Image (spheres, helix red, strand yellow):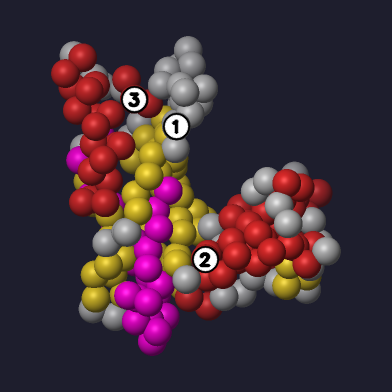
Amino acid sequence: MILIGMAWLYAGCQASIDSQRALYQWVHNPANGMVKSKEVGLYRLTMKYLPPELQASRGLARQSAQQVAGLLKSGRDNLTFVLNLSLVSPSGGQDIMYQEVSSYAAYKKRALDMNFNMAKYIAIKADGKEISPSIAHLENTYSLTQGRNIVLVFDRKQVPQSAQKLDITFTDQLFGTGIHHFVFHQKDLDNLPQVTYLGK
């Protein structure tokens, strides 16, 4: 336990990031303010910020330097988050899609909502302005995972530059857990150490 704590402390204090693994560890360290999680009854809800560097790292070995630069630019024009919905204690490999579903019609409605209607239920509130996502995309897991990820992309130009705090609200119409707030501080999102390996 002590060693794990020391690893998180090191990840939080480093001046630069020189590998994809180190970047992943940084982003997923709750102390760095890029991941917010809560549990409500049977459900765990996690909102994670995806910095442009992490997005550009996907499939890095197959990308040219020009492609990486393009991905970084595209990522910096937007704010990207991932909402993960999962069960706190899944039993028997239970898929969250079937939790508390009593009929095929109810399952179909949930699937349609997750695929096409999530943008209606999620928004950023910043300095009195409310911004809906330009993209709300359900990742296709082919039922290989028990939870689900919804990728959320917001146009950065719509977010007031003066905003110091981003309150991402999620009105849960899927599992009836209420209205949730995931508050991110801009200083944390801007505090990513220099990622050196992308320029190699």
The circle on residue 72 is: none
Label 1 CA crowd tier, 10 Å (few <14, some 14–19, many 20+): few
What amino acid type is highlighted by mark number 1? Asn
Q: Where does label 1 land, which residue?
A: 140
Tell me residue 187's x, y (percent). Answer: 53, 78
Residue displayed at 24% across by 21% down:
107
Residue 183 versus residue 3 in the image, above or below: below
Q: Quadrant of the C terminus?
A: bottom right
Marks 3/2: CA–CA distance: 32 Å
Q: Where does label 2 land, which residue?
A: 74
Residue 119 versus residue 107 in the image, above or below: below
Marks 1/2: CA–CA distance: 22 Å
Label 3 sits on a secondary structure element that is helix
Residue stretch rendered in magenta on the structure: 151-175
Label 1 sits on a secondary structure element that is loop
Tell me residue 179's x, y (percent). Answer: 23, 51
